[in-house]
Amino acid sequence: MGERAIGRADAPVVVREFFSLTCSHCAAFHRDTMPQVKKELVETGKIRFIFHDFPLDQVALTAAVVARHLPAASYDPFVSALLASQDRWAFARGVNTTDELAKMAALAGLSRAAFDAAVADEATRAALLKARDDSSRIYGIDSTPSFVFSGPAQQNQKAAGARPYSDFARLVQQAAG
């Protein structure tokens, strides 16, 4: 499983986000804070933002497996679309979550046959669960969203919760020194 990230590889600060695609707090962060993070920190070269799937339930796990079957360049836009539309594909009453997820994947260019193959991919499912367990052990992740900030002045500083931009930028500055 290759890294899914945005931003320059040589950015002075690395931010790791641990998120679940069915977490409403993760969706709130991506809706309210992430656009400014991308504009002011990623696009300016201040941070590299690394995505870590941390699925909290089977629906999130299936969605994460599907996201991993897309080309790396499509990962961030697909994840952003899923987080922005949780109410339609993950939580709507009377809908089949797999069928709704297939519709979203089709918009990202994944054929139904490729989607079905992704959903059936036990190896990627197992790898994502192992990565989640490793994240818990290595970084102490126990909730989503959680962030780990690393830079010249500070390594592996963990912060949990959907943070407003001002707080997020302060944590980046602390890691930068």
Image: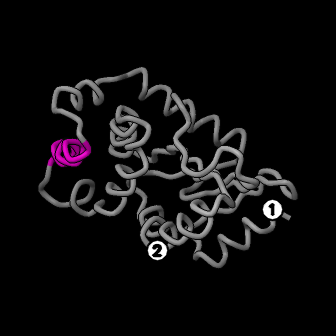
Q: Position of residue 67 (x, y in %)?
A: 37, 40
Q: Is residue 98 magenta?
A: yes
Q: Which amino acid, mark 2? A: Asp
- The magenta segment: 96-108
- In percent of the image, x 53 and y 72: which residue is there? 36
- Name the front one of labels 1 and 2: 1
Q: Is residue 67 magenta?
A: no
Q: Which amino acid, mark 1? A: Ala
Mark 1, residue position = 176
Q: Is residue 153 found left or right of 161 in the rendered image?
A: right
Q: CA distance from mark 1 to mark 2?
A: 23 Å
- Secondary element type, mark 2: helix
Q: Position of residue 148 (x, y in %)?
A: 69, 54
Image vertical order of residue 84 relative to residue 5, above or below: below
Residues at marks 1 and 2 touching, judged by CB atoms closer than 8 Å: no
- In percent of the image, x 46 and y 44: which residue is there? 55
| Location of residue 109 by image quarter | top left
Sequence-first disc among 1 and 2 = 2
Mark 2, residue position = 32
- Circle 2 packing at 10 Å, graded few (<14), some (14-19), many (20+), is some
Q: Is residue 90 found left or right of 18 in the rendered image?
A: left
Numbered-mark total: 2
- In percent of the image, x 46 and y 64: which residue is there? 30
